[in-house]
Image (tube, rainbow, N blue to C red):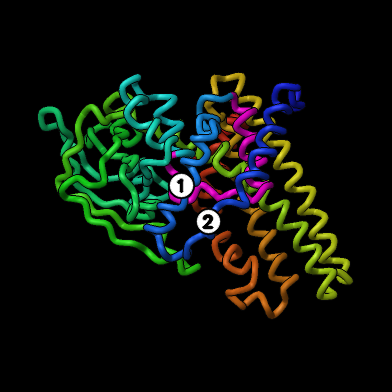
Amino acid sequence: MDLSYTPEEEDFRARLREWLAKVLPTLPPKPSPDDWPARRAYDLGWQRTLYEAGYADVRWDASPTLRLIFLEETERAGAPYVGANFVGLLHAGPTIAAEGTPAQRARWLPPVLRGEEVWCQGFSEPDAGSDLASLRTRAWRDGDDYVVTGSKIWTSHAEVADWCELLVRTDPDAPKHRGITWLAMPMDATGITVRPLRTLAGSAEFAEVFLDEVRVPVANRVGAENDGWRVTMVTLSFERGTAFVGEVVACRRVLAELAVEARRNGRWDDPVLRRRLGRLEAEFRALWRLTQWNVSGAEASGGVPGVGGSVFKLRYSHARQELYDTAAEVLGPDCLDMKRPWVLDRLSSLSYTIAAGTSQIQRNIVAERLLDLPKGR
């Protein structure tokens, strides 16, 4: 498989680098991490800047390789993270682009690209986390609406979202993977209660969401009724296959910074630490090559990442945790100082073996779909 870039792709990279170097120094300061309305406004402002410069449609309309270059270069340049736009740009948007009707794509995709609307993800439930298909949030037809009752947990950015990509059970008598439907729910609908959750790192980007006979138009269904599990697999393939691309670049930057800090504070003299840093550098180089391989595979299969995303997600989650454990070694006693670089990142890294499908789930997917091993009984 050819992992090199064409002259046209390298020209795109050069133009993007030049634009980033010009525009990034003009951005306003980032708001407080705890001020989510201000963070929403900041993140939407950055998305509008991308849109006006002609880069917003790279997310979906460009080839997977151009998307990879875009994510690589924006991360290297220190451009703002997608933040509150995470679900819309990296999950719901690509899913609607791949599975939605022309009318749905026309309604929901342009506002995300223009930085006008924020999405949240309503998948997990208190009793349906790793076993997502056991979800119980119920939806039944009433004329042109679904009436939805239930609850969701770990709903990303629910407190500032306009829309929710929502999984509901529309046929309780069907096998659990076959009675699920994917809906786009307006967050201003009557019957929705949002309660923010505070994480170990002190942030509140997740929330509980309670749904009490919320009416969602049938026209907001993406895919067929009871075909939501298949649509969800498309969503999760994007989440596991390409959503973490920029973070690999960020981790390689952190590695370089750790080496500088270790030389400064004398910990570079520890050969065991140096070996760990070297092994992690090799690990993230390999993950970057795997990313390129996955993107090439997606390009050949119509733009949707394949099962290789689970291989990437599995190894990346653990590599990220190892990286920030190593950062704690470099910092020494300062690793308890919440104001020091990498300390909050270490806390958040603990979630990566759970988020977007636990490592146990990823191992099952790799075993059954790539290695063709028998399913557990």
| Residue shown at the point (68%, 47%) measured from the top left | 76
Q: Position of residue 46 (x, y in %)?
A: 50, 46
Q: Residue 137 has which mark?
A: none
Q: Secondary structure at mark 1?
A: helix
Mark 1, residue position: 45
Q: Nearer the viewer, residue 204 or 182?
A: 204
Q: Position of residue 322 (x, y in %)?
A: 68, 59
> CB of mark 2 within 8 Å of CB of mark 1?
yes
Residue 216 can be seen, yes or no: yes
Q: Position of residue 320 (x, y in %)?
A: 65, 55
Q: Does 175 lie within the magenta span?
A: no
Residue 377 can be seen, yes or no: no
Q: Nearer the viewer, residue 249 or 151?
A: 249
- Type of amino acid at the residue the image marks with label 2: Pro
Is 177 positioned to the left or the right of 87 in the image? Answer: left
- Type of amino acid at the residue the image marks with label 1: Gly
In the figure, residue 2 lies in which quadrant?
A: top right
> Which residue is most to the left?
143
Mark 2, residue position: 28
| Residue shown at the point (33%, 55%) measured from the top left | 159
Tell me the magenta residue range.
63-88
Crowd rating for badge 2 (residues with CA inside 10 Å; few <14, some 14–19, many 20+)? few
- N-terminal of the pair, mark 2 or mark 1, is 2
- Does the magenta stretch mainly form a helix, a strand or a loop? helix
